Image: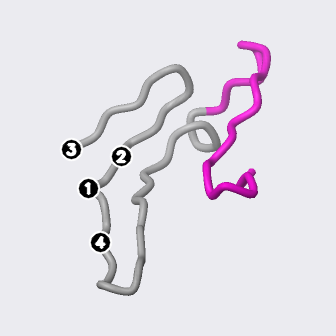
Amino acid sequence: EILPNGSLYFPPFPPEDYNPELHSATYRCRATNPAGSIISRDCKLRAGLITCA
């Protein structure tokens, strides 16, 4: 879910509902202002763990 402030929200779920195909993804953030845009490095998110390369 994307919140009004642009943040991502991942609601909690019970461990028995864990699905590695559903609960693992790579995200990148983009910030834009009148001077231009910048894109973050890849952030790999897995349920319970976040790593940024």
Residue at label 4? 38
Q: Which badge, 3 or 1, comes first in the chain's sequence?
A: 1
52 or 14, nearer to the observer? 52
Tell me which colouring the rendered structure shows: one colour
What residue is shown with label 1? 41
Amino acid type of the residue that numbered disc 3 sits on in the rendered structure: Ala
Residue at numbered disc 2: 43
Label 3 SS = loop
- Above or below: residue 49 compared with residue 41: above
Residue 16 located within the stretch drawn in magenta? yes
Q: Position of residue 51 (x, y in %)?
A: 32, 33
Residue 12's x, y, as percent?
Answer: 75, 23
Which contiguous range is marked in magenta? 1-19
- Going by the numbered disc 4, the residue's amino acid type is Ile
Toward the viewer: 46 or 5? 5
- Mark pair 3, 1: CA separation: 6 Å
Quickly name the residue at label 3.
Answer: 53
Give SS at disc 2. Answer: strand
Q: Residue, x 65% and y 32% (percent of image)?
A: 19
Q: Are marks 1 and 2 in contact (CB under 8 Å)?
A: yes
Q: Which mark is residue 52?
A: none
Give the SS element for disc 4: strand
Q: Are marks 2 and 3 in contact (CB under 8 Å)?
A: yes
Q: Nearer the viewer, mark 4 or mark 2?
A: 4
Above or below, 47 relative to 25: above
Tell me the CA gap for discs 2 and 3: 6 Å
* Label 1, residues with CA under 10 Å away: few <14, some 14-19, many ≥20: few
Residue type highlighted by circle 1: Arg
In depth, the one of 16 and 42 nearer the eye is 42
- Element assignment for label 1: loop
Mark 1 vs mark 2, CA separation in Å: 6 Å
State left or right for residue 39 relative to residue 4: left
